[in-house]
Amino acid sequence: MIILLIDDSDLIRQRLSKYLSTLPQIEQVFEAASQDEGLALLAEHNPELVILDISLPEGSGIHVLEHIHEKKIPTRVLVFTNYPFPQIEKRCMELGAEHFFSKSTDYERVKEVIAEMLDQSKSQLTPQPQIMTKKLLVVDDSPTMRRMVISSLQELTPVQFEQAESGLSAIEKLALYKFDLVILDLNMPDMHGMEVLKFIRKHQMYQDIPVIILTTKGDEKTRKEALDAGATMYCTKPYLPSVFAGEVKSLLNR
């Protein structure tokens, strides 16, 4: 973090600089003893934190705050002053200062707040693991069955569902979206689910998508045909929602 100290007191700048030098998160500390010098360093170095006095040669800390506020400069401001009057504090907070402290009583508290702000900055910079939304295609000519399947998988957040009521509709959906898993019925009016499965496995852009066959046909011949054609899993209706959800979760987490 880059910090700018704007204070006409050599002692205050020295004390704060010495403290800041002990903190590993600090990249650099710039010091200004007047309003104009502070504004120049602000424009040149884009500090992430400004520690600001109110009474300054050539102007005031209020003017510096007004400049930061007007120009929408993305920096945090901590005011540290010998003038801890309510009306001044109110104006500083209106202009975007985050903290307002008295030099006579709050030096240790200022150090604590700086440490807290640095910790916040560190946590914001630490990459957070992204939870990717999984997109599932549910293909079945029965609206009731599609609703049941989606309902049984809602707990697998974050998931997003697309529905297809026929084999041809499923192929159209595959062209429009990138899916992480397909749940496919076999008996459909326009295009049999087995043909949809073969289409998926034939095209390179789809062939790695896990496909679960979910059908009323429980005979071994159909099961073998589906698995030979590239089905990842073969399930029969009716099914236990909790068991089915566990199997889908396992496939999505591979």
Image (cartoon, rainbow, N blue to C red):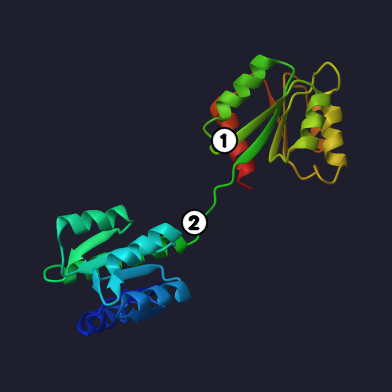
Name above or below for residue 131 compared with residue 181: below
Disc nearest the viewer among 1 and 2: 2
> Which element type, helix, strand or loop, lies under badge 2?
loop
Looking at the image, tell me whether mark 1 or mark 2 is earlier in sequence order.
2
Which of the two residues, 97 or 35, is positioned nearer the viewer here? 35
To which quarter of the image does residue 171 belong?
A: top right
Return the residue nearer the eye: 249 or 52.
52
Residue 68 lies, in percent from the top left, at 39, 62
Please tell me which residue is depicted at 52% across the width and 55% down the height of the picture. Answer: 129
Callout 2 amino acid? Gln
Tell me which corner region of the image, top left, top right, bottom left or bottom right, holds residue 167. top right
The label on residue 246 is 1
Alpha carbon distance from label 1 to label 2: 26 Å
Residue 231, position as x, y percentages in the image: 77, 36
Say which quadrant the N terminus sits in.
bottom left
Viewed as shown, does residue 211 lie left or right of 125? right
Q: Is residue 69 above or below residue 105?
A: above
Say what amino acid the circle numbered 1 marks: Gly
Judge from the rendering whether residue 121 lies leftward or rightward of residue 56; answer left or right: right
User: Outermost residue, front direction?
Assistant: 58
Residue occupying image coordinates x 46% and y 72%: 43
Residue 137 visible (yes or no): yes
Q: Residue 166 appears at what percent x and percent y?
A: 79, 21
Where disc 1 sits, the SS reads: helix
Q: Which residue is at a point 30% across and 59% down the rendered structure image?
A: 97
Q: Position of residue 116 (x, y in %)?
A: 29, 64
From the image, tell me which residue sits under label 2: 128
Q: Is residue 247 visible?
A: no
- Point 22% across, 53% down: residue: 90
